[in-house]
Image (cartoon, grey):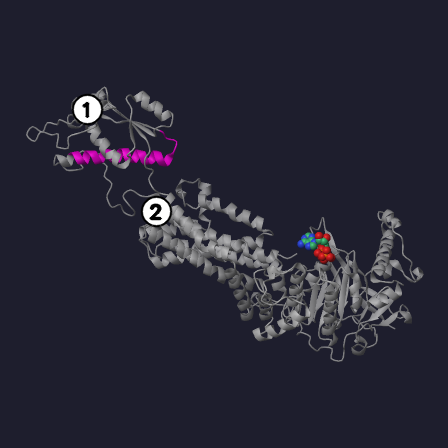
Amino acid sequence: MPAYDNAGATISLEDEIPPEHVTIVTDNFDLNQRRHQFQSQKSTVTSRRQQAVCVRRAHKRYGSKSNPNVILDGLNMTVPKGAIYGLLGASGCGKTTLLSCIVGRRRLNSGEIWVLGGRPGSPGSGVPGPRVGYMPQETALFGEFSIRETMIYFGWIAGMTTIEVDERVDFLVTLLNLPHPTKQVKTLSGGQQRRVSLAAALIHQPELVILDEPTAGVDPVLRQSIWDHLVEITKGGRTTVIITTHYIDETKQANVIGLMRGGRFLAEEAPGELMRRYQAENLEDVFLKLAVLQNMGKRRRSSILADIVEKVELPSLPDPSVIDLEEDLGEISGEFGDNVSMSSKGRVVVTPDIASPMEALPPEEKPPTTCFERIKPMQWRHMKSLMWKNFLSLFRNYSLLAFIVVLPLSQMVLFCIAIGHDPVGLPIGIVNYELGENNTNVPCNYEKVCPMDPNTYEWNLKMFSCQYLDFLSKKQPNLVYYPTKEAAISAAYHGKCRVVLVFQANFSSSLIDRMVDPRHATDLDVKNSEIEVHLDDTDKQVQWMLARDIQVSFMDATQNLAKSCKLPTRLLSIPVFFHDPPVYGLTIPILTDFAGPGVILTIVFFLAVALTSSSMLAERNEGILERSLVSGITGTEILFSHVSVQMFMMMIQAAVVLFIGFVFFDLTNNGPLGWVILLTVLNGFCGMTFGFFVSCLCDTERTATFIALGSFLPMMLLCGIIWPIEALHDFLQWISYVLPLTKSTESLRSMLQRGWSINTPTVYYGFMSTGIWIAVYLIASILLIKFKKG
Ligand SMILES: Nc1ncnc2c1ncn2[C@@H]1O[C@H](COP(=O)(O)OP(=O)(O)OP(=O)(O)O)[C@@H](O)[C@H]1O
């Protein structure tokens, strides 16, 4: 017999196979009728593609190159079509990792995998896709859905009609002893949920069923009926099952079992043959013996393990001399040709049906050459299932619905009520010596007639301080009178008043001297004609507003005086005139109008972030994302289905915010309403994409929440929402310009207050910046979904 060279291994089969070790698989299963006698054949790509699953020289590690955690260490695996393959191994040995590589969710570091004739993830392979039914270890179901709705979701993805799904649901409910299909998944027991998860993997009768511990938490009777069903579906040879379990003994019903340890298979063979060869009563004994033998093999290489191995009692072996531990207990499956699966000296014939070797194989894979070929188009049936699922989840989640409407409403109401209004009732200390000795008890009255003699033009101004205080009290009514300047200032030091105004005894006459006859006015006249102001400057807003009220009240009083004397009203005012109305905005601007645009955009942006930053994570953490991806849905489809559903919610939120701001609280809006709405919605969309990005970037909801919350304050501070950008440090100004809310806030403010339209650069820069950020976040999210695997 010739020698075969497969990837560097030159092995002659001729003398190695004692006839007694050549076994035909017969267990409960007519593979021997469908499969041909053992014939050694060269392992070729074609022969590998004819297996249901074929893994060659698989290496997989987690962690960095310098500190690797090697999970698969040159593993080979051959799963013939139509077989039940039991994958056994201790917890943590890498079974789930191997399965996720098979379904295309993780990549090997090196080696190759063929699944149903194609490479997982390659175009036309159907894997991930409807050819595979995958039941992950976690339940991976939607708690809010009923059993039937769960099946409809997975059935639709696989291209089934609702009628077909209903028929299968009836069958599976009986088979798996499930409760009524209308029952909500979250109300089921753990074992029932696992069975629903199994049903979801079987609903579309896939060619390859991969079940990660389907019988965990299932009672023995039901476990037997699940196995009976698996035997039944594999009978025709169309369906192949790979199953992992911790109940080693139940795999007696498998056609082939792979015993995994140390990143390789200790054996890959029919269970009956293994027990016979190792003269073991059960498979657990076989596993134990093989494990000890593997350790002995290692001992030769490593003295470190010597102590451990010496303590292990070697079980009795049929004839240890026939086993070359070093070579034979190493991984050898498939290296001799893909029609053979073998371990040790025994060979199990698992020759595929070669009557029509290329039947049902996907077309030869051509690697994508252009970027366009790499992008998978979205499929309507996937989008339909996803959008239906997302809307259903939304409408089942009442607290979330309330959150969507109540939160923007309450935040906008809070902003409009709480921000921008002038503080009223601030205590203002008054010391008015013009009222005489007993100044706190004398009423502060003044004559409203003109104090100027119409004939001589002599002024006889009296109690102008009272006239002034009359105007001041219209703006700040809480005037508190103190007898002396010292008492008032002491009260200010103790926080009893925010400002102290002192009027000297001859305030009115000195004022007239200063205005009418400045040539004879002394320094004392000037000093006495001034209102002495002592401010508590701790609060900039309060200080600024009090200073404004004090000065404006004076101008009001002088204008009133001029008016009573029929003089030009501005005659007695300071010679600085502020035009009314101003170029844009109000004569006395209110902070609500300044902060309003930024606050509207911030509310819409961050509510969208809050909605989306957990959506992908919730799917991922519940295992649903993994399951959906294996069923053929792409990350882009999941992303866009969330985008469409959350877009709907975000638009509701944007409408609530704008309605409350402009209709209820009458915020200034001189702008083109259409563009205002469009910018607000675009900005919410930008928040959504940022949320998706965070969701794809983080592994836990907690980290996502930290990032989402952590980004809130810097954006508020740096985007010119509460303080002008021009007041920032130069370096911060640069940062500010590249943040997503800066340009859009400027744009919205210009539209609302200045009435500018889209043809103004400030306005269209806002739209452009938002559009660029949307594209950046979307592309980053898609790339993360695509490449952020294990
Ligand atoms: N994403 C990951 N990053 C780092 N290590 C991981 C990752 N996933 C799994 N591992 C490690 O890889 C090893 C194999 O894990 P895996 O889940 O494949 O084992 P398993 O055989 O399926 O275990 P079990 O039977 O308990 O489910 C474990 O040590 C695990 O800690």
| Viewer-nearest residue: 704 or 38 | 704
Ligand 1: give its quadrant: bottom right
Which residue does the numbered mark 1 point to in the structure image? 510
Could you tell which of marks 1 and 2 lies nearer the N-terminus?
Answer: 1
| Viewer-nearest residue: 572 or 764 | 572
Which residue does the numbered mark 2 point to in the structure image? 593
Residue 327 in the image, given as x and y percentages of width and height:
86, 60
Work out whether residue 7 can be spotted.
Answer: no
Residue 584 in the image, given as x and y percentages of width and height:
29, 48
Looking at the image, do the residues carrying marks 1 and 2 touch, with CB atoms under 8 Å apart? no
The crowd level at tag 2 (other Cα within 10 Å; few <14, some 14-19, many 20+) is many
The kind of secondary structure element at disc 1 is: helix
Instruction: Indicate yes or no whether the magenta region holds residue 210.
Output: no
Q: Main secondary structure of the magenta part?
A: helix
The residues colored magenta run 536-561
Which residue is the extreme one toward the top? 437
Q: Mark 2 is on which residue type? A: Asp
Q: Mark 1 is on which residue type? A: Ser
